[in-house]
């Protein structure tokens, strides 16, 4: 949430003054809906790129002078279900444009993709660049507030018999449609697809001092061209993992305040002596 961003979001604070709240049903999963992809009910997912053998991941650090765009975190082996290949930074959930609504996802649904560890939104940076192959690309980014740049559709890779998105063996291409067509390099671009570049993430060289580290991560972009090798598998996250992530998010602000308090009352030598 960014004040003054016209995002439709409002800040909520505690007050000694009494105020009333209306409880509205957000989402529930009926037995006959278990097979469908849904928004709400703590339903989180991982986005797996089978060609890169990697999960869509994003930093949990607050953006500094230089942004940290999302990237693909490669696995240590070929087993997708191996917990060692999973990271809390690779957990996402979907949100309808009307954020107070939940329910079954349809193929024609326009949705937002939120990073579960930070609550930030996946988006497309409208600053086109031309590659050496003449392809126009756009950088992926994370932003604090929902905007037109954070709206996506999921395109099926094969014909579907239902309007609902069935969760089992669900593979999609992630597409963003611009509010206005982008003219660049003599081209008129109306939409772009998430694309695996096979290029190493900047400053992602292997560190010899770190044992058993993950393979080097690779970058993702959005491109005007729909590539056949770019489907993402949508993999559900277990309720236990979602719960643990929510607990960690709740604890982190308290830990940050504690660390800040220590740093402002003691010098580094005192802290080192206590460790």
Image (cartoon, helix red, strand yellow):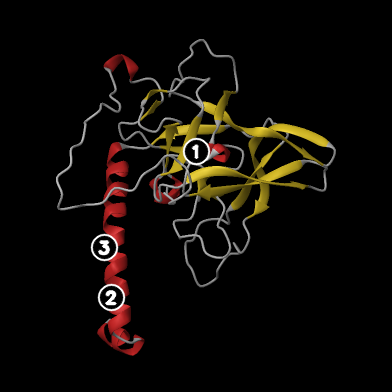
Q: For the point 48% across and 41% down, which residue is it?
A: 146
Residue ID for mark 1 = 47
Q: Residue furthest front?
A: 17
Residue 49 visible? The answer is no
Q: Position of residue 219 (x, y in %)?
A: 62, 50
Q: For the point 51% across and 32% down, which residue is it?
A: 233
Q: Nearer the viewer, residue 274 or 129?
A: 129
Q: For the point 28% across and 65% down, which residue is it?
A: 255
Name the secondary structure under disc 1.
strand
Residue ID for mark 3 = 254
Q: Residues within 10 Å of mark 1 (few under 14, many from 20)?
A: many
Q: Residues within 10 Å of mark 3 (few under 14, many from 20)?
A: few
Label 1, label 3: how far apart the Cα atoms are: 30 Å
Label 1, label 2: how far apart the Cα atoms are: 37 Å
In the image: residue 222, left or right of residue 77: right
Label 2, label 3: how far apart the Cα atoms are: 11 Å
Relative height, residue 89 to residue 234 (above, below): below
Q: Position of residue 188 (x, y in %)?
A: 78, 33
Viewer-nearest of discs 1 and 2: 2
Residues at marks 2 and 3 touching, judged by CB atoms closer than 8 Å: no
Relative height, residue 57 to residue 46 (above, below): below
Viewer-nearest of discs 1 and 3: 3
Sequence-first tag of 1 and 3: 1
């Amino acid at each position: 949430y960014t004040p003054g961003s016209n995002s439709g979001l409002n800040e909520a604070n505690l007050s000694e003054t009494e105020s009333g709240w209306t409880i509205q049903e957000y989402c529930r999963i009926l037995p006959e809906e278990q097979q469908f992809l849904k928004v709400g009910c703590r339903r989180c997912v991982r986005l797996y790129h089978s060609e890169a053998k990697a999960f869509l991941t994003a930093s949990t650090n607050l953006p500094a002078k230089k942004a940290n765009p999302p990237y693909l975190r490669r696995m240590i082996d070929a087993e997708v279900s191996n917990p060692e290949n999973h990271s809390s930074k690779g957990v996402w959930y979907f949100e309808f444009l009307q954020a107070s609504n939940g329910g079954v996802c349809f193929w024609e649904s326009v949705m937002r993709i939120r990073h579960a560890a930070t609550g930030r939104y996946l988006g497309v940076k409208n600053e086109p660049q031309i590659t050496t192959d003449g392809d126009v690309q756009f950088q992926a980014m994370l932003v604090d507030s929902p905007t037109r740049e954070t709206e996506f559709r999921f395109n099926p890779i094969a014909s579907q018999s239902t309007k609902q998105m069935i969760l089992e063996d669900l593979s999609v291409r992630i597409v963003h449609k611009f509010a206005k067509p982008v003219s660049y390099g003599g081209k008129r671009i109306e939409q772009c697809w998430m694309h695996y570049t096979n290029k190493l993430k900047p400053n992602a060289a292997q560190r010899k001092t770190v044992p058993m580290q993950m393979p080097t991560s690779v970058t993702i972009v959005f491109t005007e061209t729909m590539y056949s090798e770019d489907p993402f598998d949508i993999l559900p996250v277990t309720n236990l993992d979602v719960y643990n992530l929510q607990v960690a998010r709740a604890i982190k602000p308290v830990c940050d305040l504690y660390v800040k308090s220590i740093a402002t009352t003691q010098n580094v030598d005192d802290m080192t002596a206590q460790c």
